[in-house]
């Protein structure tokens, strides 16, 4: 049975306490949150296979540290959405502000609109699918996981990248230090096909270009001093 | 951290509610800036009349007979509307320079918060709700307005350190962020003849824009050259007599949200500030791009 929570009437702490109290075995799986009205820290720190629908736009840190839960936001999210996500799924129907999915370890973040600057900064295993464009300095120092962008990418994409994989369908304003375009091999097409499907996106994997680390900045080399 | 709100009305039927909507937005941004608050409000223009908004630490002493004292000279036909620590002086626009000179002589402690045809600026130390209430912001009407809630980082918490800053006739600036080259730029602008009242970084940004416009730039050009000359973090919102603009620095770590409908353009540091605006559900809501000048005119 759907649990309905009016955030305006009941308050943020009560909401997060109720959601965080759900266990792995809970039978209260569907939840809806009404009147988020741009509130910060909505549905953070969840650790149960529940399904949370947020009926409107949120502020900072929506779905932060998520584990297992599926969170769907029928609106836009402020800075730091899905920050440090461990597992589960977060779907944003609108836009995301800066550093969406930052430091995420796992799970999937889907942004159906645009993401602003620093999307996927320092990502550590999360998969991020953005239907629109992303801003500058996205995937900065990204360590692992996959960032898929169906639109365009801003300046300095993938600066100081480690092993994260980046796929962009549109233009890239500029690549960051040590980020280079790489060949699309059949295994990348297959990987992308699965991510696009999971990300509720009908783009064709063949239309994307792949970017990754040139691996020149892993260890300090005086010849690369100008690139750091 | 600071909070910025702005509301530019396209639909004149909303003008009586400008103060009500703007104060609601301002108070929502209290936790971004609880130490002081201010607003610039653009009201009705009276032909050939100009306005000075004045501020005094001792309003009873300074304002009680001010209209009479200024009017002692027959050419100065002035009216004075006292509002708490502030007062709006209305006079013939050709007498503005004369009135300013006379004011400095008669009331050396009175500060001029704004000058122009329609702008009024009110700002004080305190929680945004207290500041809004003491000036009766809720009851003000106008065509557009800008508000700021301050969490001071670069200079002391004082009335004059609060935003908005009046940059030129009917122009104002509010700022979320911190400028890192404000000391060197202040020295440079002093050599160019600009005067400063505080150690505040935003005042330097405001003086920079004024200086640029005095030397031939439009506001748009002044903002554009600010991208080169102002070092640091900023989301700026500027107001003019009939317009309203937004500029973020190229790094764009200071938040900003814009919303537009057929009735208004609204700015908030966060979406929270916009949620009670009429018909917001149907608005186009977006995050302004870095290093891009946005501007709306009546």
Image (tube, rainbow, N blue to C red):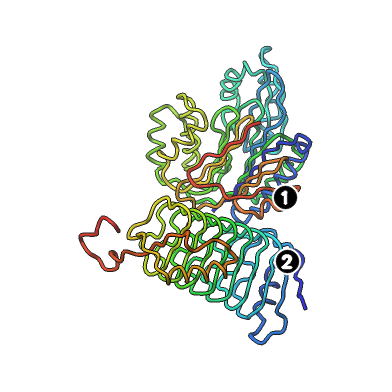
Q: Is residue B13 left or right of residue A185?
A: right
Q: Is residue A92 above or below residue A46?
A: above
Q: Provide the chain ID for the residue under circle 2.
A: A
Q: Quadrant of the C terminus of chain B?
A: top right
Q: Quadrant of residue B80?
A: top right
Q: Position of residue B171 (x, y in %)?
A: 58, 32
Q: Position of residue A173 (x, y in %)?
A: 42, 50
Disc number placed over residue B282 in the picture, else none: 1
Structural crowding at the residue carrying mark 2, measured as other residues with C-alpha within 10 Å and reported as few (<14), some (14–19) or many (≥20): many
Q: Position of residue B33 (x, y in %)?
A: 59, 52
Q: Is residue A151 above or below residue B215?
A: below
Q: Is residue A172 left or right of residue B79?
A: left
- The residue at the point 63 percent across, 80 percent down is A49
Q: Is residue A34 above or below residue B284?
A: below
Of the pair A10 and B110, the residue shown nearer to us: A10
Q: Is residue B291 left or right of residue B269?
A: left
Counting every numbered tag in the picture gives 2
The nearer-to-camera label among 1 and 2 is 1
Q: Say which element carries label 1.
A: helix
Disc number placed over residue A7 in the picture, else none: 2
- The residue at the point 69 percent across, 48 percent down is B283
Q: Position of residue A85 (x, y in %)?
A: 53, 72
Q: Quadrant of residue A78?
A: bottom right
Of the pair B137 and B244, the residue shown nearer to us: B244
């Amino acid at each position: 049975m759907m649990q309905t929570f009016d955030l305006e009437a009941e308050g943020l702490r009560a909401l997060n306490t109720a959601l965080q109290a759900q266990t792995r075995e809970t039978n209260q799986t569907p939840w809806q949150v009404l009147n988020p009205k741009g509130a910060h820290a909505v549905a953070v720190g969840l650790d149960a296979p529940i399904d949370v629908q947020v009926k409107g736009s949120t502020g900072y840190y929506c779905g932060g540290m998520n584990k297992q839960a599926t969170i769907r936001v029928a609106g836009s999210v402020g800075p730091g959405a899905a920050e440090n996500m461990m597992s589960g799924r977060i779907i944003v129907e609108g836009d995301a502000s800066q550093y969406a999915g930052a430091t995420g370890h796992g799970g999937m973040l889907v942004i159906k609109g645009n993401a602003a600057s620093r999307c996927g900064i320092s990502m550590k295993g999360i998969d991020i699918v953005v239907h629109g464009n992303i801003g500058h300095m996205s995937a900065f120092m990204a360590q692992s996981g996959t960032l898929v962008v169906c639109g365009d990418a801003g300046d300095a994409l993938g600066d100081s990248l480690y092993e994260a994989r980046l796929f962009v369908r549109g233009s890239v304003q500029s690549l960051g230090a040590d980020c280079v375009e790489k060949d699309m091999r059949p295994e990348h097409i297959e990987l992308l096909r699965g991510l696009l499907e999971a990300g509720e996106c009908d783009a064709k994997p063949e239309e994307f270009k792949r970017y990754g680390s040139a691996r020149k900045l892993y260890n300090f080399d005086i010849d690369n001093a100008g690139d750091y | 951290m600071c909070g910025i709100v702005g509301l530019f009305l396209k639909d004149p039927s909303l003008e009586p509610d400008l103060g009500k909507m703007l104060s609601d937005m301002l108070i929502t941004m209290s936790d971004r800036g609880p130490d002081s608050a201010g607003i610039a409000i653009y009201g009705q223009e009276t032909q050939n009349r100009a306005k000075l908004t004045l501020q005094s630490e001792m309003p009873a002493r300074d304002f009680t007979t001010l209209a009479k004292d200024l009017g002692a000279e027959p050419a100065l036909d002035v009216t004075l509307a006292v509002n708490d620590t502030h007062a709006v002086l209305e006079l013939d626009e050709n007498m503005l320079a004369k009135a300013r000179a006379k004011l400095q002589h008669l009331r050396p402690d009175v500060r001029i918060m704004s000058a122009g045809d329609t702008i009024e600026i009110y700002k004080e130390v305190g929680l945004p709700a207290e500041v809004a209430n003491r000036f009766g912001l809720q009851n003000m009407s106008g065509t557009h307005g800008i508000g700021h809630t301050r969490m001071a980082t670069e200079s002391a918490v004082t009335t004059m350190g609060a935003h908005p800053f009046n940059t030129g006739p009917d122009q104002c600036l509010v700022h979320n962020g911190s400028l890192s080259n404000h000391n060197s730029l202040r020295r440079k602008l002093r050599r160019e003849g600009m005067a400063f009242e505080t150690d505040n970084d935003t005042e330097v940004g405001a003086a920079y824009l004024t200086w640029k416009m005095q030397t031939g730039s439009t506001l748009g050009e002044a903002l554009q050259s600010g991208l080169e000359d102002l070092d640091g973090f900023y989301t700026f919102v500027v107001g003019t007599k009939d317009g309203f603009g937004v500029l973020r620095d190229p790094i764009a770590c200071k938040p900003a949200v814009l919303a537009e409908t057929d009735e208004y353009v609204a700015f908030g540091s966060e979406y929270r500030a916009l949620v009670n605006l009429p018909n917001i559900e149907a608005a186009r809501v977006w995050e302004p791009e870095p290093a891009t000048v946005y501007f709306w005119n009546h």
